[in-house]
Amino acid sequence: MCWRRLPSGPVTLAAGGTRVEIDDAGEGPGAAVVGDLPPNSRLSLDVAWLGGKKRLRFKTLPSPPGELLYRFATVNDIHIGDRAFGMYRGMAEPPGTEPPFPWRCATAALQEAVEWGAESIVVKGDLTRAGRPREWASVGRLLASQPIPVDIILGNHDVQRTAPDARPLLAEHGIKVPIEPFFRDVPGLRLVFGHTAAQGARKGAIDEAQRRAVAELCAAADGPAFVALHHYLQRFRMTTMWPPGVPGPQADAFLDAIEAANPATIVATGHSHRHRRHSRHAIVTAEIGSTKDYPGTWAGYAVHEGGIRQVVRRVARPDAMAWTERTRRAMFGIWGYWSPGLRTHRCFTHVWPTRGER
């Protein structure tokens, strides 16, 4: 549960037999987890405070079929090096604020994902503002300090025209980023990593060689696959939403190749800083927002024998949420409505189709 403001004093949250006590939420935004709830159930959340109460109704997600096999999390668009957010006169913190908001939000997201139970982390590009060596040094220290494995792909901010090659800079911290598409097999799933960012280009690209390579990796998986990209897949040739992603014809050819190779595949991207889900035949694609601007999120995935569950959570640490809540006012307030997307696009359960099923 997230809030912009709660009444002062103690507050109680209760749902499905779980009770959470908040001594004092303070004056700003915050969040709390009310866990151990039954799946696929309509429940009530009772919020009680001194002198008042409120009841909210919600429904929990169904559990994917079969046993839980693995949990992992993704983050993207952490933008280490940013000092402001927004178009035109961007929002900025007071000079000298340390640590700056990208670092606060990224460290909090990673810590919360590990506490949630993630067994590995996938970082889907735009780790830096401009790919500068000092930015990569910070990224390297941050990711190398994680207690679980971390896999990385690069985004357009990381491969700007004047940026040095990030791979040797990350290798100094023990982090390898192969040039070609690569994979990691985990219980119940193959994680496949593609590269859509090209040196000096904002929009993404998936050429025939990459399409074939990613499809082959998905086809060779013993079971389902999860494809991580930086750029989202456009529905049309022309860009209809900013920033530009992978043009529609390339995107459609890519998804068709993935479906032919392994229809039990989900594709997850970043770049747009918003949340959206759509499908092309059997393949579900999901865009996940940035850690460092509203609503400030990371995504957790629970892999079961028969499907996968995606849950998007806000970065809840108070010093991170205070910043991301402020950024909802970007674009004259439109950003606060545009970036979260629909709840059903952020959180959903996907049952794996069988190979050969369309």
Image: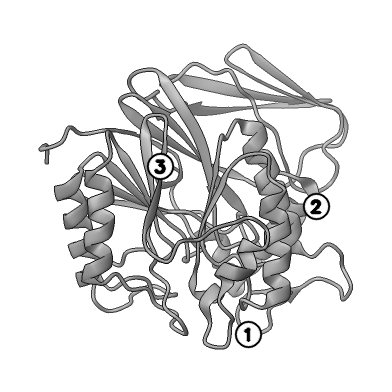
Point out the frontmost of discs 2 and 3.
2
- Rendering coords of residue 198 (x, y %): 41, 78
Looking at this view, name the residue that lies furthest to the bottom: 162
Residues at badges 1 and 2 in contact (C-beta under 8 Å)?
no
- Rendering coords of residue 357 (x, y %): 11, 37
| Sequence-wise first label, 1 or 2 | 1
Tell me the amino acid under the disc marked 3.
Thr
Residues at badges 3 and 1 in contact (C-beta under 8 Å)?
no
Query: What residue is shown at x 53% (from left), y 42% (from top)?
Result: 73
Structural distance between the alpha carbons of marks 2 and 3: 28 Å
Q: Which residue is mark 3?
A: 344
Point out the frontmost of discs 1 and 2.
2
Tell me the amino acid under the disc marked 2.
Asp
Quadrant where the N terminus is found in the figure:
top right
- Rendering coords of residue 174 (x, y %): 63, 55
Structural distance between the alpha carbons of marks 1 and 2: 25 Å
Q: Which mark is residue 292?
A: none
Residues at badges 2 and 3 in contact (C-beta under 8 Å)?
no
For the residue pair 186 and 44, the one nearer the viewer reads as 186
Q: Which residue is mark 2?
A: 319
Q: Which mark is residue 88?
A: 1
Give above or below for 174 relative to 351: below
Structural distance between the alpha carbons of marks 3 and 1: 32 Å
